[in-house]
Amino acid sequence: MHYKTAFIVRFKRAWGNILAPGCLLGPAIWLSNSESSRIHRRVCRGRHSSRGSILPWIIFIVKVALWYALLVWVSLVITLLIDLKRIRQDKGNESYDSTLRRIGLWAYLGFWLGAKPQAYFRLRLYASPPKQWLNYAFPQEQSNWHNSLGYRNESSAKIELADKQITEERLHQNGVPCVNTVHILARGKPIDDHMMYTKQHYFIKPKSLNAMRGCARLNYQSERPGYQLTGYDLQLNPIAINGEQNINAYLQQLSSQVELLVQTMLTDHEQLSSYSDDRDISTLRIITCRFNEHIHVVHAMLEVAIKHTMHWARYDVDVATGILQLANDSSNDAEFPSDFTIPFWPRACKYVQDAHRSFDLIKTVSWDVCISPEGPVIIEGNSGWGLSAPQTTSQRPLLQGTLGSAYTLGLKNHNTQHQDA
């Protein structure tokens, strides 16, 4: 972050916490304390220490005096009680002092930045001094982050991007390869068996929902003629339904709530499929940002299904070369070679940049891309992408580079017509 803008960013973010302390009001800030302790025991015990400072305690005392701090204080005490057993075990040991310093940093993290203790471990804040923590964008800032980055007139474009059918049509018009919709299950309309059951594999997803809600795979089983539907319902509960009659009943009930798109099933490029499980395709997530009148590729990561498990692994991708940054990942679960390069990487960058130009009023978009045997295929775009994954995968804060400059400019121009510098 540039020195001349660091003060503006720090002031506006801290001032926002004071004026709108919703993220700090109440015990929600300290939920999942046991999870935080588990992460600490698994990842950080005996290996990471934090240098203490009187500054966190000064800020802590000041924050306690604010009107909204009472419930946070109570929940902080709960956090300390949960970790009390470990503190007793460490007493007299070399790590005891670092444990107490860590608790002070938790208080600083919560009362000054409004972040949960888990952020200390997930974002690896223990590896950097507290004065650098403002370079990270914390999850509770997500709505303000996107609002500050965005243009005042981009709301209609975001609605269009969220509509997967509109996105597909616009990308096709501009010559950008994207997934094909072969059928639409409209609300209240009967299922057309001749369109659905053609001995092909299809992917079914809601027209305007994210996070796998209502997404399912329709697989044709040739060895035992018939169909199987596997995936998740709208509450993210797993489903596995066999037989056309049962599948029709489920889809009819689902389509009465949301409109569904039936799309062609994508497959991985052979260089990716050899390292991933065949239950799902590998997804390349590329973030683009419009800044200084250009579309920049600012971040990329690859998400793959690990073989013989129900887990996924994420890998940072060097946006300049397309090479996986395996050294930044705690474990290479998919066992990629050290010099693995994303197939068709230059074409993937070009396609997402062209796709972003199709929604030019939106500042930043995260694109889901499948690297198929024929080349990159865009699945969808998301203007409200999450802040945690890009930072935990790359181990770099978002407030550095192009995204940081765009965000800083947005903060300076807050509540005015945003213009590129």
Image (cartoon, rainbow, N blue to C red):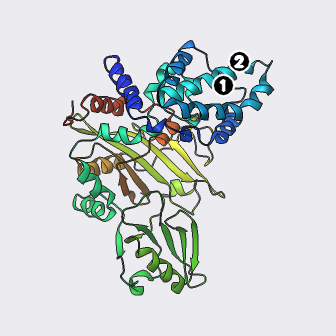
The residue pinned by badge 2 equals 97
Q: Is residue 314 left or right of residue 159?
A: right
Coordinates of residue 371 in the picture (x, y in percent): 43, 55
Residue at the (66%, 35%) spot, across then down: 78
Coordinates of residue 376 in the picture (x, y in percent): 38, 55
Q: Nearer the viewer, mark 1 or mark 2?
A: 2
* Secondary structure type for disc 1: loop
Number of marks in picture: 2
Q: Earlier in the sequence, mark 1 or mark 2?
A: 1
Judge the density around disc 1: few (<14), some (14-19), many (≥20) Cα neighbours within 10 Å.
few
The answer for how far apart the CA atoms under marks 1 and 2 are is: 12 Å
Residue nearer the viewer, 416 or 360: 416
Residue type at mark 1: give it. His
Judge the density around disc 2: few (<14), some (14-19), many (≥20) Cα neighbours within 10 Å.
some
Is residue 223 shown above or below 299? below
The quarter in which the N terminus is drawn is top left
The residue pinned by badge 1 equals 48
Q: Is residue 3 left or right of residue 225?
A: left
Residue type at mark 2: give it. Asp
Is residue 58 shown above or below 406? above
* Secondary structure type for disc 2: helix
